Amino acid sequence: MLEKYLGAIILLGLGAGIGLLLIYAPILLAPRRNLPFKRTPYESGMDPVGTTRQRFSVHYYKVAMLFTVFDVELALMYPWVTFFRENPPWALGLLISFTLILAVGYIYLLRMGVFDWSRKEL
């Protein structure tokens, strides 16, 4: 019974072994030099200026998350195209309902002022 899975078990063991080797080999073999300049944060080759606890606006991340949410809509429309050939009325209803739900979310975000870049608070 186990003979059927012997190849897969060997391949799995080999993959796990190589993965562990690649993770732990640098820890064991790499030279360590604890110099002060190696502990400074890297800022595009420039010396760091200011404190690391500086607060910054998160508008970029907010827009990136919204883009991701609305980009998923497009990714979910590809299976819809293949389903449309099998049952067009049902597929069209699904697309319209899905798009309406996302449109309601978009209108809610628009009314909440999420897309207003001049706002200081979220």
Image (spheres, helix red, strand yellow):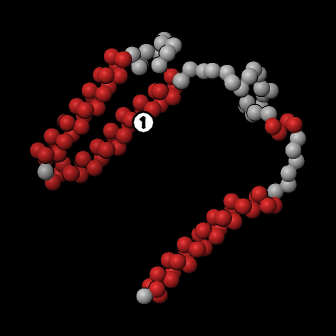
| Residue that appears at 33% across and 16% down | 111
Q: Is residue 48 left or right of residue 111?
A: right
Q: Which secondary structure, mark 1? A: helix
Q: Quick one: quadrant of the N terminus?
A: bottom left
Counting from the top left corner in percent of width and height, residue 20 is at 66, 64
| Residue that appears at 47% across and 27% down | 62
Q: Is residue 27 above or below residue 71?
A: below
In the rendered picture of this protein, how many numbered marks are placed on residues?
Answer: 1
- Tell me which corner region of the image, top left, top right, bottom left or bottom right, holds residue 35: top right
Q: Which residue is situated farthest in the left direction here?
A: 89
| Residue that appears at 63% across and 21% down | 55
Q: Is residue 77 left or right of residue 10?
A: left
Counting from the top left corner in percent of width and height, residue 119 is at 48, 12
Q: What residue type is disc 1 on? A: Thr
Mark 1 closeness class: few <14, some 14–19, many ≥20 residues within 10 Å: few
Q: Is residue 62 above or below residue 89?
A: above
Q: Is residue 12 above or below residue 29?
A: below
Counting from the top left corner in percent of width and height, residue 85 is at 17, 52
| Residue that appears at 15% across and 40% down | 93
Q: Nearer the viewer, residue 44 or 51?
A: 51
**Residue located beneath label 1 in the image:** 68
Q: Is residue 69 left or right of residue 93?
A: right
Q: Nearer the viewer, residue 51 or 99?
A: 51
- Tell me which corner region of the image, top left, top right, bottom left or bottom right, holds residue 45: top right
